[in-house]
Amino acid sequence: MPIHLIWGNDYEACNREIEELINSVIDSSWKSFNYSQLDGNDPKQNLRALEEAQSAPLGSGGRIVLVRRSPFCNGCSIELGNKLEQVIKLIPDKTHLILSNANKPDKRLKTTKLIEKSIQSNTLSQEKSFILPLPWDINGQRNLVKNNLERLNLKMNYETIDLIVESIGNDSSLINTELQKLSLFSEAVNTNLTTDKPREISKELVKKLIQNNSTNALEIANSLLKGEKIIALNKIQSLLKNGEPALRLITTLTGQSRGWLWVHLLDSQGNQDVKEIAKLAGIANPKRIFVIRKQIQGKSLGTLLELMKKLLKIEASIKSGIKPIDSFKDNLLTDSKILANN
């Protein structure tokens, strides 16, 4: 009765772990019979998951029952908890129950204790967590890049890793995508390299493939700060037409805006330690603080707060399905004090 508890807000890593489990357990020829995915937000589907988990696989290979947004370790009802207690010992050896949730399991719950006990008693069971580092946790973001490099059999020096962190931040999905692109490009131009040793990715290659788009986004942010909204929108439209992902663009703009806001706040409190400001603001390179100070000179806290608010609204609008360019126009062209030079 293998049970897998997979949780955390790094959805890219969680989904990758789930996909690896599916590929290792299920015979692809029998997947349509031996794979079920259910939504934990629906009480009926939770009960159905427990019913299906009692079924042995058909044909060869194993069976997987996946419950996304699983409630079993986070606010589980008494009825569902009692049902789990009845079922957990009836799960066949080749049927794997995967419980996935963004939140950390609540150790106080009876169901959590029951599941953890089952995991400890079965060598095929496991609990894995994947947590994204906070925006100001530079070392955590570096480790996120390092983990992805190791998985893709790549390597970088510290300066190149910091360049990735500055360009992307803690977006796990984007880091994975960009590193895969770098890997493919590096493999294409270095055909003589052996496949068993980690392939080194140079700082120059990162600048060529990643930082160029990031730099364009930073230019857009500077235009917004100066009040040049039409210029900014033209650049935004050009980037989007050239295939720049809208969410990556807004992530870069938000990251720049957040850095301005933090530096303004810390400077206003009399903090002069550049390294400490960089650490608190989530800026990998402390030398950037001097550049940021020049950029925000003469800008009020209210101006920076309003810009951040607009960017967050744009992000929410894009995620809700609004066409990206319309999201930018609707929010940036409205009357606002963000473009005032106060």
Image: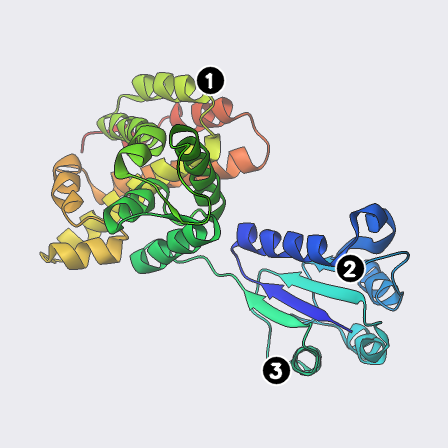
Task: Examine the rendered structure and indicate whether residue 328 appears above or below residue 143.
Answer: above
From the viewer's perspective, is residue 297 above or below residue 107? above
Closer to the eye: label 3 or 2: 2
Of mark 1 and mark 2, the one earlier in the sequence is 2
User: Tag 1: residue type?
Assistant: Lys
Mark 3 vs mark 2, CA separation in Å: 27 Å
How far apart are labels 1 and 2 at the CA level?
Answer: 41 Å
Residue 241 tag number: 1
Q: Is residue 314 visible?
A: no
Q: Earlier in the sequence, mark 1 or mark 3?
A: 3
Residue 47: image location, x then y, percent = 84, 65
The residue where tag 2 is placed is 64
Rendered residue at 44%/19% (across/down): 242
Q: Which mark is residue 108?
A: 3
- Residue 164 visible in the snapshot: yes
Distance CA(mark 1)–CA(mark 3): 51 Å
| Rendered location of residue 258, percent (x, y) | 30, 45
Residue 226 lies left or right of residue 8; in this view the side is: left
